[in-house]
Amino acid sequence: MDKQRFTLAVLTIVPLVVACGSEKAGGGSGSVDEQRSVTGVDWRVQGITADGAAQQVHGKPWLAFDAKTGKVGGLLGCNSVGATATVRAGHITLGRPSTTRMMCDASLMGTERALLGLFGGRVSYRVDHDTLTLTSGNGTIVRAVAGE
Protein backbone atom coordinates (compact mmCIF):
# COMPACT_ATOMS: atom_id res chain seq x y z
CA MET A 1 0.00 0.00 0.00
CA ASP A 2 2.87 2.41 0.74
CA LYS A 3 4.23 1.93 -2.78
CA GLN A 4 0.80 2.80 -4.25
CA ARG A 5 0.53 5.97 -2.12
CA PHE A 6 4.04 6.99 -3.09
CA THR A 7 3.29 6.45 -6.79
CA LEU A 8 0.02 8.40 -6.48
CA ALA A 9 1.79 11.23 -4.66
CA VAL A 10 4.52 11.40 -7.32
CA LEU A 11 1.95 11.35 -10.13
CA THR A 12 0.07 14.18 -8.40
CA ILE A 13 3.03 16.38 -7.43
CA VAL A 14 5.26 16.08 -10.52
CA PRO A 15 2.81 17.76 -12.92
CA LEU A 16 2.30 20.58 -10.40
CA VAL A 17 6.04 21.11 -10.02
CA VAL A 18 6.53 21.09 -13.78
CA ALA A 19 3.66 23.55 -14.27
CA CYS A 20 5.01 25.90 -11.59
CA GLY A 21 8.51 25.65 -12.99
CA SER A 22 7.36 26.65 -16.47
CA GLU A 23 5.54 29.81 -15.43
CA LYS A 24 6.38 32.54 -17.88
CA ALA A 25 7.60 35.89 -16.69
CA GLY A 26 6.33 39.11 -18.20
CA GLY A 27 2.74 38.13 -18.80
CA GLY A 28 3.37 34.80 -20.47
CA SER A 29 5.87 35.91 -23.09
CA GLY A 30 8.04 32.84 -22.52
CA SER A 31 11.04 34.85 -21.36
CA VAL A 32 12.02 37.15 -18.57
CA ASP A 33 10.61 40.61 -19.23
CA GLU A 34 13.68 42.72 -19.97
CA GLN A 35 13.53 46.43 -19.28
CA ARG A 36 13.88 48.50 -22.44
CA SER A 37 17.01 50.65 -22.55
CA VAL A 38 16.63 54.42 -22.65
CA THR A 39 19.29 54.55 -25.40
CA GLY A 40 18.90 53.38 -28.97
CA VAL A 41 15.15 54.11 -29.05
CA ASP A 42 13.17 56.90 -30.70
CA TRP A 43 10.95 58.13 -27.86
CA ARG A 44 7.75 59.79 -29.11
CA VAL A 45 6.55 62.44 -26.68
CA GLN A 46 2.97 61.80 -25.56
CA GLY A 47 2.59 64.04 -22.51
CA ILE A 48 4.24 67.05 -20.89
CA THR A 49 3.67 68.57 -17.48
CA ALA A 50 5.36 71.93 -16.97
CA ASP A 51 4.88 74.43 -14.16
CA GLY A 52 2.50 71.95 -12.52
CA ALA A 53 0.07 71.89 -15.45
CA ALA A 54 -0.45 69.36 -18.23
CA GLN A 55 0.51 70.79 -21.60
CA GLN A 56 -1.02 69.70 -24.86
CA VAL A 57 1.58 68.09 -27.12
CA HIS A 58 1.61 69.57 -30.61
CA GLY A 59 3.49 68.29 -33.62
CA LYS A 60 5.34 65.00 -33.43
CA PRO A 61 8.15 65.62 -30.95
CA TRP A 62 10.62 62.84 -30.23
CA LEU A 63 13.96 62.28 -28.51
CA ALA A 64 16.67 59.67 -29.07
CA PHE A 65 19.57 59.06 -26.68
CA ASP A 66 22.77 57.61 -28.16
CA ALA A 67 25.09 55.92 -25.66
CA LYS A 68 27.97 55.64 -28.16
CA THR A 69 28.14 59.35 -28.98
CA GLY A 70 26.91 60.60 -25.62
CA LYS A 71 24.29 62.77 -27.29
CA VAL A 72 20.56 63.26 -27.56
CA GLY A 73 18.81 64.39 -30.72
CA GLY A 74 15.26 64.87 -31.77
CA LEU A 75 12.44 67.17 -32.69
CA LEU A 76 10.89 69.54 -30.19
CA GLY A 77 7.71 70.17 -32.15
CA CYS A 78 9.05 72.81 -34.49
CA ASN A 79 12.84 72.73 -34.30
CA SER A 80 15.42 69.98 -34.20
CA VAL A 81 17.51 69.67 -31.05
CA GLY A 82 20.86 68.22 -30.10
CA ALA A 83 22.80 68.16 -26.84
CA THR A 84 25.24 66.09 -24.85
CA ALA A 85 23.58 63.36 -22.82
CA THR A 86 25.32 61.26 -20.21
CA VAL A 87 23.07 58.36 -19.30
CA ARG A 88 23.59 56.71 -15.92
CA ALA A 89 21.39 54.36 -13.94
CA GLY A 90 18.24 56.33 -13.19
CA HIS A 91 19.38 59.74 -14.45
CA ILE A 92 20.62 61.61 -17.51
CA THR A 93 22.73 64.75 -17.51
CA LEU A 94 21.65 66.87 -20.47
CA GLY A 95 23.84 69.64 -21.82
CA ARG A 96 22.69 72.97 -23.18
CA PRO A 97 20.54 72.41 -26.25
CA SER A 98 21.44 73.46 -29.75
CA THR A 99 18.38 73.94 -31.94
CA THR A 100 17.46 75.06 -35.40
CA ARG A 101 15.80 78.48 -35.33
CA MET A 102 12.56 78.21 -37.26
CA MET A 103 9.45 79.99 -36.10
CA CYS A 104 6.30 77.92 -36.19
CA ASP A 105 2.71 78.05 -35.05
CA ALA A 106 2.34 79.18 -31.42
CA SER A 107 1.10 75.71 -30.35
CA LEU A 108 4.26 74.05 -31.69
CA MET A 109 6.42 76.68 -30.03
CA GLY A 110 4.63 76.03 -26.71
CA THR A 111 5.47 72.33 -26.92
CA GLU A 112 9.05 73.27 -27.75
CA ARG A 113 9.41 75.64 -24.79
CA ALA A 114 8.10 72.97 -22.43
CA LEU A 115 10.51 70.33 -23.76
CA LEU A 116 13.45 72.72 -23.50
CA GLY A 117 12.80 72.66 -19.74
CA LEU A 118 14.53 69.27 -19.68
CA PHE A 119 17.87 70.53 -20.94
CA GLY A 120 20.82 72.07 -19.17
CA GLY A 121 20.81 69.83 -16.10
CA ARG A 122 20.11 66.45 -14.64
CA VAL A 123 16.85 64.61 -15.21
CA SER A 124 15.74 61.37 -13.64
CA TYR A 125 14.25 58.72 -15.86
CA ARG A 126 12.17 55.60 -15.52
CA VAL A 127 11.39 53.08 -18.24
CA ASP A 128 8.30 50.96 -17.76
CA HIS A 129 7.95 48.54 -20.67
CA ASP A 130 7.58 50.88 -23.68
CA THR A 131 7.05 54.10 -21.72
CA LEU A 132 9.78 56.54 -20.69
CA THR A 133 9.19 59.16 -18.01
CA LEU A 134 11.70 62.01 -17.66
CA THR A 135 11.55 64.35 -14.67
CA SER A 136 13.72 67.45 -14.43
CA GLY A 137 14.77 69.30 -11.31
CA ASN A 138 12.50 72.20 -12.28
CA GLY A 139 9.45 69.92 -12.28
CA THR A 140 9.05 69.34 -16.02
CA ILE A 141 7.75 65.81 -16.61
CA VAL A 142 7.78 64.24 -20.07
CA ARG A 143 6.13 60.93 -20.93
CA ALA A 144 7.13 59.23 -24.17
CA VAL A 145 6.52 55.88 -25.84
CA ALA A 146 8.96 53.82 -27.85
CA GLY A 147 8.69 54.39 -31.58
CA GLU A 148 8.43 51.52 -33.98
Image (cartoon, rainbow, N blue to C red):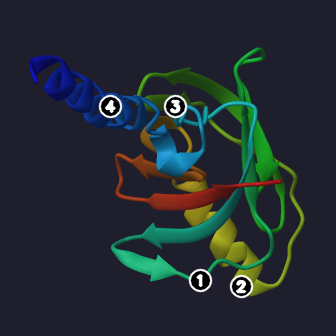
Could you say whether the residue bearing mark 2 is in a helix, strand or loop? helix
Q: Residue at x 34, y 46 (%)?
A: 137
Residue 48 rendering spot, x and y as whole percentages: 52, 69
Q: Is residue 68 above or below residue 10?
A: above
Q: How much space separates mark 1 and mark 3, taking CA atoms?
A: 36 Å
Labels 2 and 1 touching (C-beta < 8 A): yes
Q: Residue at x 73, y 27 (%)?
A: 71
Q: How much space separates mark 4 and mark 2, taking CA atoms?
A: 67 Å
As rendered, which of 7 and 89 lies closer to the eye? Answer: 7
Camera-near label (4 vs 1) is 4
Is 4 displayed left or right of 59 in the figure? left
Q: Residue at x 68, y 66 (%)?
A: 112
Q: Which residue is drawn at 71% across and 84% down?
A: 107
Q: How much space separates mark 2 and mark 1, taking CA atoms?
A: 8 Å
Q: How much space separates mark 2 and mark 3, taking CA atoms?
A: 42 Å
Crowd band around label 1 with a 10 angstrom C-alpha radius: few (<14), some (14–19), many (20+): some
- Label 2 sits on what residue type? Ser
Residue that numbered label 2 is attached to: 107
